[in-house]
């Protein structure tokens, strides 16, 4: 019998093959029943050849990802090669070339491109990228291209990362779409390079990598964990409160890097499978299970080598990044973390540790990374804050910080799914609205209306207010998911303001984004 799956497979045969099969059937003249069945199947294949739904892989997702570097002294090339290796280790085909090797025709056909570029001399392109910059000026449009740039420089020079910034502006002018925002690295700053690694992890869909330069964590204590959206139809979001015995400072907009740990059950299962005792004491007094909690778990036991050597060969777990959700003067460091799940249904490494496995009172390994690109303007500058989901974290920190100045003007546009379950920190937001600290508050819940309404819809509806605030010198700060909200809000802004004004706002520092 010809079943649906077999018929579906038959429909993918080339058309000449189907016709040849039909001719052979008539020439061979098999038994009447078999012949009729095969001829019917062939006829159906011919009829359905062009109308059966074809399973297509999204364009640009299966091909090789190109990483092009502009390097005068070798640093950009070395980082490009490291980036290439991380992507390959994650199962993504990648290739590394000098920027001048990228021709006009190839650029016009590329769908994704990563650029790792240095600035040479007085803001010039390195020698192996000068031809490319000249040819880029002759390109008419690159709407198919999605790109990201890691720019290397030294902030003590006036033309800090000038070449990378010129590339960013020119590619956007050609309608190319950023995969994520430009990253400028000051003197090979380790934190920015770790952030680039995180972005590579998002691209490859594999965040299990080895940090090029591990974070030097400090111990913080988990004081409180509260689910902010119980009963919601999506993943839960938790508010976590941490404290430190040290005097640590940060600004609204800064990032924390967390050193995650495996769930105890997973470590015990791994060691038991290897025939090792999780409660075994190491020479330094540490339990074996605790020593493994911050490392990639082993697949073999230490037969012919010492335990110390065996442990040293296990690479540390990669860090995880989260926006800080409180200002320093609040006395605590808050995070808003959405519990993520991996393909097999298990909790994400970082969010699982923070939202499920870490006990209250437990030590959390944490490092604060300065993020000047999202730190706030002075209190006299009106501020428009836009975000969704756990992106409220970075916006809340700015509102807390600006609360010290009672005359600051603030407007928050925030979106989630259902008001009944996802009204995150609603009492605090309403209190700020009532006091006037929030001059305007627009809340949207996509699953509560028909048609569905998102934060970008609220922004478009408030176009006249947006123009008025910008005319008063307001800055726009956007925090949350890049896919979906981040891109949609940017599209809305370009429709309302035009590409030129949005690019001018970005270049002047009045349009800033913290997207992930």
Image (cartoon, helix red, strand yellow):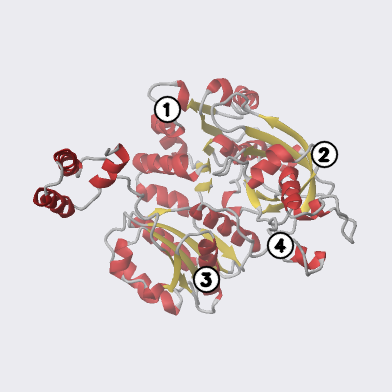
Residue on which the image places disc 2: 361
Task: Tell me the mark number nearer the camera, choosing from 3 and 4.
Answer: 4
Q: Can you give x and y, in whole percent of width and height, for residue 298 in the image?
A: 70, 58
Query: Residue 314 got which mark?
Result: 4
User: In terms of sequence position, does the residue under pointer 4 or pointer 2 come before the other?
Assistant: 4
Please tell me which residue lies in front, 234 or 272: 272
The answer to the question of whether label 3 and label 2 lie on touching residues, with beta carbons closer than 8 A, is: no
Q: CA distance from mark 4 to mark 1?
A: 48 Å
Quadrant hosting residue 397: top right
Please tell me which residue lies in front, 228 or 189: 228
Q: CA distance from mark 3 to mark 1?
A: 43 Å
The answer to the question of whether label 4 and label 2 lie on touching residues, with beta carbons closer than 8 A, is: no
Q: CA distance from mark 3 to mark 2?
A: 42 Å
Please tell me whether mark 1 sits on a helix, a strand or a loop: loop
Q: CA distance from mark 3 to mark 4?
A: 23 Å
Task: Tell me the mark number nearer the camera, choosing from 4 and 1.
Answer: 4
């Amino acid at each position: 019998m010809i079943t649906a799956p077999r018929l579906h497979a038959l429909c993918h045969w080339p058309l000449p093959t189907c016709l040849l099969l039909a001719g052979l059937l008539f020439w061979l003249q098999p038994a009447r029943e078999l012949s009729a069945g095969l001829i019917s199947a062939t006829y159906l294949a011919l009829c359905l050849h062009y109308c059966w739904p074809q399973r297509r892989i999204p364009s640009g997702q299966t091909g090789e990802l190109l990483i092009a570097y502009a390097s005068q002294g070798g640093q950009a090339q070395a980082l490009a090669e490291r980036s290439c290796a991380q992507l390959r280790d994650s199962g993504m085909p990648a290739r590394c070339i000098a920027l001048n090797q990228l021709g006009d025709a190839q650029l016009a056909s590329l769908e994704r491109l990563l650029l790792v570029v240095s600035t040479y001399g007085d803001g010039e392109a390195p020698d192996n990228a000068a031809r490319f910059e000249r040819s880029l000026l002759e390109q008419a449009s690159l709407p198919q291209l999605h790109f990201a740039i890691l720019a290397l420089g030294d902030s003590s020079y006036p033309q800090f990362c000038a070449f990378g910034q010129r590339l960013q502006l020119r590619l956007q002018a050609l309608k190319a779409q950023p995969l994520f925002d430009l990253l400028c690295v000051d003197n090979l700053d380790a934190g920015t390079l770790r952030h680039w690694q995180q972005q590579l992890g998002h691209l490859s869909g594999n965040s299990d990598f080895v940090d090029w330069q591990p974070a030097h964590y400090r111990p913080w204590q988990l004081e409180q964990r509260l689910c902010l959206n119980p009963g919601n139809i999506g993943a839960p979001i938790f508010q976590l409160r941490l404290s430190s015995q040290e005097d640590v400072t940060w600004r609204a907009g800064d990032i924390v890097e967390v050193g995650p740990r495996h769930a105890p059950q997973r470590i015990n299962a791994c060691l038991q499978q290897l025939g090792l005792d999780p409660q075994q004491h190491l020479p330094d007094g540490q339990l074996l299970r605790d020593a493994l909690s911050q490392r990639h778990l082993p697949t073999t036991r230490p037969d012919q080598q010492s335990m110390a050597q065996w442990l040293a060969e296990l690479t540390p777990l990669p860090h995880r990044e989260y926006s800080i959700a409180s200002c320093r003067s609040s006395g605590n460091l808050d995070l808003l973390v959405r519990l993520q799940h991996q393909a097999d249904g298990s909790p994400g490494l970082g969010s699982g540790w923070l939202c499920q496995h870490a006990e209250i009172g437990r030590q959390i390994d944490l490092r604060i990374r300065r993020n000047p690109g999202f730190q706030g303007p002075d209190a006299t500058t009106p501020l428009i804050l836009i975000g969704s989901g756990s992106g409220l974290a970075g916006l809340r920190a700015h509102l807390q910080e600006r609360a010290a100045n009672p005359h600051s003007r603030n407007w928050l546009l925030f979106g989630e799914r259902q008001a009944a379950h996802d009204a995150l920190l609603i009492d605090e937001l309403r209190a700020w609205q009532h006091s006037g600290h929030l001059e305007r508050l627009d809340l949207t819940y996509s699953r509560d209306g028909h048609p569905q309404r998102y934060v970008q819809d609220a922004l478009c509806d408030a176009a006249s207010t947006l123009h008025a605030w910008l005319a008063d010198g307001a800055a726009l700060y956007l925090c949350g998911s890049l896919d979906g909200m981040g891109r949609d809000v940017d599209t809305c802004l370009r429709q309302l303001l035009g590409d030129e004004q949005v690019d001018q706002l970005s270049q002047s520092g009045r349009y800033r984004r913290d997207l992930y």
